[in-house]
């Protein structure tokens, strides 16, 4: 009981409250400086002791793009133009989403020393893992856009919209899934293993290696499967990126003066934009749900780890 | 005097389960065995602390002191009862949490400071003070991997002790470090106390509890067996004063 604590100081401390009220995504945003430091740590530690360092995150996608470029030109059919851009534009989305799932599911477990010791919004960990995936996605976009200019790119306004929509969808769904899976993995450790299996399946469901036009005739026989296929947020994001970065590279010829229009009809499902908008809205609902699930499960994290 | 903390009927139990895996679960279900038992670590604990007051939590190993501290700090949720606190809680618990061996001392100061709830400006403002306290100026640009355990602890303590807070928690921290550094820590803690910080101190060291705390709470098997003046609490604990080294 000292005289140094004045009434003003006591008022500054605020009311008596539960020390665990500062939880949730809102507080992750409030403590974004910590989020930034955690992301920077991950990135720095990843390239620790490496000579080329951050350069690797450019070399890897660059080499991959070159490989696709040559393989597509040498082996795969020549009827569809610029297959390398098709594969790579889908790959950007796929790579990001699958790391969201795999790194996200391990995010809380990996930081168990902090979870067990420090009172902080635990959503911080899945959010940081998604932010690291975003950081790694950036060089892929750079390589993709360089590739566009090498091959020849004629983007229209809708291409920009498609790219933004694809990005928004994959970030919202990736974040939601990372939050849910990171919490589930604390309770059932099989989650992280199951995610690897799901990732393998996911890799083939989206039109990344093959084009939508090759699978569309087969899907036409099964209206329900077709609906599932085109409403899958991951597939929708891949196809939006196809629209933004692949179809816009179709060469303009005398026979086809508007290759974007013909390409859209031929290579993409109808109403892609409208459906994607609904998917994005649903994604925000899922994010709210993810926060709800995380809050419910988070109470026993410290006991379980 | 305003109340800094209310702990009201707080209970926390853990499920001790050893039936992990589908095979084990099936076998147990078939044989009708239940391979889980609950263990109550903290059992209906209540106390109140004024702003600027200090309390020592004592008890034998496994009596629930650290669990109670985790409930107070907000790392764990109680099963029942409430914990209310006024202002920011931090302190010398689990010092060095979040330190990464591949980062430099400087980077770890910033990261650890942010983990403990400091803003960028606060860390920048306290940076020199932290460095000065840790006596690590020469090594702060090197990676923590190359630090000795003593250097690591000094840096970690320095950050923790400089974290701005209203309620300061301490968990048996003065048992590490060499004597001069322990003295320095003790001096700093007494300064914080004189500044009017509310303190919760978990310790086996009866002399330190009497030195630092007004109140004492003795736990045995999770239950409060004594709550009152620190000097009385020490007697209730029946510790042998002569066994302890003097700091």
Image (cartoon, rainbow, N blue to C red):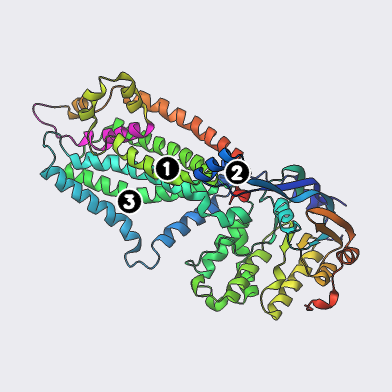
What chain is tagged by disc 2? A
Residue at screen point 47% across, 45% down: A190
Percent across and percent down for residue A180 are: 51, 39
Quadrant assignment, res B8:
top right
For label 2, count other residues whose C-alpha is less than 10 Å away and answer few (under 14), some (14-19) or many (20+). many
Residue position for label 3: A139
**Label 3 vs label 2: CA separation?**
34 Å
For label 3, count other residues whose C-alpha is less than 10 Å away and answer few (under 14), some (14-19) or many (20+). many
Give the magenta range.
Answer: A233-256
Residue position for label 1: A194
Residue A161 seen in the figure: no
Q: Of residues A203 and B192, which is closer to you in this image?
A: A203
Are the residues flagged by discs 3 and 2 from a single subunit?
A: yes
Q: Is A151 contained in the magenta span?
A: no
> Mark on residue A298?
2
Percent across and percent down for residue A237 are: 34, 34
Q: Dot 1 lies on which element?
A: helix
Using residue B116 as the reference point, say whether residue A65 is left or right of it.
Answer: left
Choose mark 2 or mark 1, whichever is in front.
1
Choose mark 3 or mark 1, whichever is in front.
1
């Amino acid at each position: 009981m000292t005289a140094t604590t004045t009434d003003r100081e006591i008022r500054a401390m605020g009311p008596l409250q539960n020390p665990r009220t500062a939880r949730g995504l809102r507080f992750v945003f409030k403590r974004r400086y910590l989020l930034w430091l955690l992301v920077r740590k991950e990135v720095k530690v990843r390239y620790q002791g490496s000579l080329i360092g951050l350069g690797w995150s450019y070399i890897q996608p660059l080499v991959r793009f070159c490989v696709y470029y040559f393989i597509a030109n040498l082996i795969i059919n020549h009827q569809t133009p610029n297959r390398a851009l098709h594969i790579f534009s889908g790959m950007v989305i796929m790579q990001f989403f699958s790391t969201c799932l795999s790194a996200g599911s391990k995010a809380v477990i990996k930081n168990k020393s902090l979870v067990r010791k420090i009172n902080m919004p635990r959503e911080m960990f899945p959010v940081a893992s998604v932010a690291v995936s975003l950081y790694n996605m950036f060089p892929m976009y750079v390589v993709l856009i360089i590739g566009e200019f090498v091959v020849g790119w004629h983007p229209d306004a809708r291409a920009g919209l498609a790219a933004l929509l694809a990005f928004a969808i994959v970030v919202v769904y990736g974040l939601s899934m990372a939050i849910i899976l990171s919490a589930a993995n604390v309770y059932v450790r099989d989650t992280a293993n199951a995610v690897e299996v799901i990732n393998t399946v996911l890799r083939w469901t989206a039109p990344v290696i093959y084009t939508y036009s090759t699978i569309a005739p087969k899907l036409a026989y099964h209206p329900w499967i077709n609906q599932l296929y085109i409403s899958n947020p991951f597939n929708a994001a891949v196809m939006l990126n196809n629209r933004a970065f692949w179809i816009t590279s179709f060469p303009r010829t005398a026979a086809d003066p508007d290759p974007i229009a013909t390409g859209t009809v031929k290579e993409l499902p109808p109403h892609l934009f409208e459906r994607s908008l609904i998917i994005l809205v649903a994604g925000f609902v899922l994010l709210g749900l993810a926060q709800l699930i995380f809050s419910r499960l988070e109470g026993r994290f410290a006991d379980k780890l | 005097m305003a109340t800094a903390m209310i702990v009201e009927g707080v209970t926390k139990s853990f499920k001790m389960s050893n039936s992990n895996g589908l095979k084990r679960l099936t076998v147990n279900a078939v044989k009708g065995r239940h391979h889980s038992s609950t263990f109550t670590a903290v059992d209906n604990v209540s106390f109140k602390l004024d702003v600027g007051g200090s309390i020592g939590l004592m008890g034998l190993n496994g009596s629930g002191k650290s669990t109670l501290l985790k409930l107070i700090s907000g790392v764990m949720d109680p099963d029942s009862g409430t914990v209310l606190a006024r202002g920011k809680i931090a302190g010398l618990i689990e010092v060095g949490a979040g330190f990464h061996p591949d980062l430099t001392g400087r980077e770890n100061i910033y990261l650890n400071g942010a983990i403990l709830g400091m803003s960028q400006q606060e860390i920048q403002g306290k940076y020199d003070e932290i460095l000065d306290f840790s006596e690590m100026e020469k090594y702060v640009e090197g990676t923590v991997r190359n630090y000795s355990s003593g250097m690591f602890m000094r840096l970690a303590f320095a950050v923790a002790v400089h974290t701005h807070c209203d309620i300061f928690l301490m968990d048996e921290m003065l048992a590490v470090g060499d004597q001069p550094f322990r003295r320095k820590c003790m001096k700093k803690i007494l300064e914080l106390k004189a500044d009017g910080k509310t303190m919760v101190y978990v310790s086996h060291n009866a002399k330190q509890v009497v030195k630092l705390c007004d109140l004492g709470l003795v736990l045995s098997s999770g239950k409060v067996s004594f709550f009152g003046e620190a000097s009385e609490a020490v007697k209730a604990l029946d510790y042998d004063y002569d066994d302890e080294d003097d700091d």
